[in-house]
Image: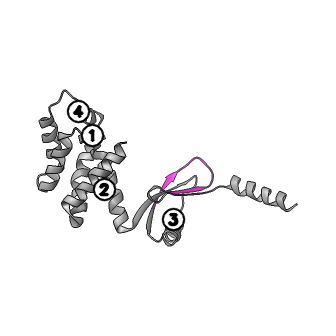
Amino acid sequence: MDMLIAKRYVKALVEAVGERKVASATKSLERVAKAFEDKKFAELMISPEVKKSQKEELVMALSGEKVDPKISNFIKVLNIHGRLGLIPEIVRQLQKELQRRANKYEGLVESSVKLDKKELSELEKSLSKYVDATVVLRQVKSREEGIKVVIEDLGLEASFSKERVASDMINHILKAL
């Protein structure tokens, strides 16, 4: 539900600030979203005991000294409607929008063995060609044998494991008999 509401706010923000200023708006709000990683701050922002004016002042201070007036108004609207807690999700949606516009997507490679830079680069090139976009991969250590590639924003997930290949080969041989 929060994602759907955040998308509406993102759409309104993009229209308000214009195409050119979306990246700077995202950076301003990223500072605030980072503060939500602190559990006490997040609780403070949703607490009914804290006045809305105090919440707004705190968020404005976190967003930077030279805040675009449209970002300032955006924060005020969020505050009026009691939606300051949506800022982290709004930032995630803004980042996705920026990726879509740049046609550049980030993904994860989960593997039990560390891939060297050349292999990772080749995998990025292959996937970039396949999805017709720039793909940047980050490797994460996994306990499972094989390799799993996930690019969430594109809905892409591919995995290769020894067990699966062996199983597929056995099934293929059995069907041939």
Left or right of 19: which side holds 65?
A: left
User: Foreground: 121 or 80?
Assistant: 80
Reading the image, the residue beneath label 4 is 44
Q: Label 2 sits on what residue type? A: Leu
User: Foreground: 65 or 18?
Assistant: 18
Left or right of 130: which side holds 175?
A: right
SS label for mark 4: helix
Q: Main secondary structure of the magenta part?
A: strand
Query: Going 23% across and 30% down the picture, which residue do you hit?
Result: 47
Q: Tell me how far mark 1 sits from mark 3, CA to CA.
A: 37 Å
Left or right of 168: which side holds 121?
A: left
Q: Which of marks 4 and 1 is nearer the N terminus?
A: 4
Query: Going 37% across and 64% down the picture, which residue do you hit?
Result: 100
- Quarter of the rendering containing residue 55: top left
Q: Does residue 62 appear in the picture of this structure? A: no
Which residues, given as a range, are shown in magenta? Answer: 137-151
Q: Do the residues labelled 3 and 4 touch (CB within 8 Å)?
A: no
Q: Label 3 sits on what residue type? A: Leu
Q: Tell me how far mark 2 sits from mark 4, CA to CA.
A: 24 Å
Q: Earlier in the sequence, mark 1 or mark 3?
A: 1
- Quarter of the rendering containing residue 134: bottom left
Mark in front: 3 vs 4:
4
Q: Does residue 85 appear in the picture of this structure? A: yes
User: Foreground: 33 or 50?
Assistant: 50
Q: Tell me how far mark 2 sits from mark 1, CA to CA.
A: 15 Å
Mark in front: 4 vs 1:
1
Q: Residue 85 carries which label?
A: 1
Q: Earlier in the sequence, mark 3 or mark 4?
A: 4
Q: Label 1 sits on what residue type? A: Gly
